[in-house]
Image (cartoon, rainbow, N blue to C red):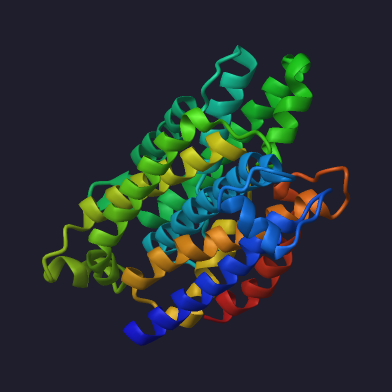
Amino acid sequence: MVKRTVVTAASIGVLLIGTIIWALDSGSVNFTASEILAYLGGAREGGYQIITFIRLPRIIFAMLVGGMLGCAGAILQAVFKNPLVDPFITGISSGAAFGAAAAIVAGVSGLIAPAIAGAFATIFIVYRISMTYTGLDVNRLLLAGVMIGSFFSSLIMFINAVFSRDLIKVVFWLMGDLSNINPDYMLYAVLLALASLAAAIYFANDLNIFTTGEEEARTLGVRTEFIKTLYFCLAGVLTAVSVALSGVIGFVGLIVPHIVRRFTGPDLRAVIPVSFLAGALFLLAADTLARTLFLPAELPVGVITGLAGVPFFLALLPRVRRA
């Protein structure tokens, strides 16, 4: 397992480096590899401003958001024992999106706090609905997430209809937008992402045992209620921060963990960190396509991930049914 994980992570790392070079070179102005290296090394002539202050921050931004979404998807698929689950199906993204959309129309400058508030409001509501006298029912939690997510999506449409002055801004943001980078919030986002990833990896072996069955996990001393609550909250934080930074980007959390498990196996100590790395690769590639396919126009990155995600979902669905 360790060898497979190392080989997979190294392969993704090589692909990621290649994608970074491609992203640095892609745009209305092209550069040679030697020019890119020179600018990154501190050379200030020519396209230094473009590489250093426009393309490189966006690359880091896309990798961070993609990594968080990939990690959140891996967590939720493990908790629900279902490869079709992602942050959007559980309602977390819709709650975070509602919080951020409300902040946009209210003129609030920072979106991270409102998005996290929306995500945790969703988590709290879904959690309370899903509690039974025996504990947290994962199946009820999934159904409740779908319903509450639909409710918040309706509220977002209500906001769009009532506050028409912000309609274009909100709609474009809801399709996923990596063009609006706010460096003031990047440090907070990085710290939250690293803390959530560290906690997810630290308790990953307990989650491994949990996925074999709750009764078996309890007999082995796993605090199943704590594990379910912890990982649902971690997925909420990762999703909320990504939504606050970039809007609603679908299917990253669905596609990435499923592909990663094919190479690393089911051990979540490997799946979770490798999903973070693979999510960074996937979204960076999608964003590079989104901003270069129709130059000088730019597509929302959610359009690209959706075009990739829907066929993937439809291809995956029959296999899940057979299982």
Camera-side residue: 188 or 25? 25
Q: Residue at x 27, y 64 (%)?
A: 204
Which image quarter is the N terminus in? bottom left
Report which quarter residue 170 is drawn in: top right
Report which quarter residue 286 is drawn in: bottom right
Percent x, y of residue 140: 42, 51
Camera-side residue: 90 or 114? 114
**Residue 2 drawn above or below residue 100:** below
Q: Is residue 58 left or right of residue 234?
A: right
Residue 183 visible in image: yes
Residue 306 visible in image: no
How many numbered marks does the figure carry? 0
Percent x, y of residue 132: 29, 47
Percent x, y of residue 269: 31, 69
Q: Is residue 180 left or right of residue 188?
A: right
Camera-side residue: 101 or 287? 287
Q: Residue at x 47, y 31 (%)?
A: 185
Percent x, y of residue 168: 78, 26
**Residue 319 drawn above or below residue 23:** below
Q: Is residue 126 left or right of residue 286?
A: left
Q: Residue at x 23, y 47 (%)?
A: 133
Q: Is residue 234 left or right of residue 66?
A: left
**Residue 213 drawn above or below residue 225:** below
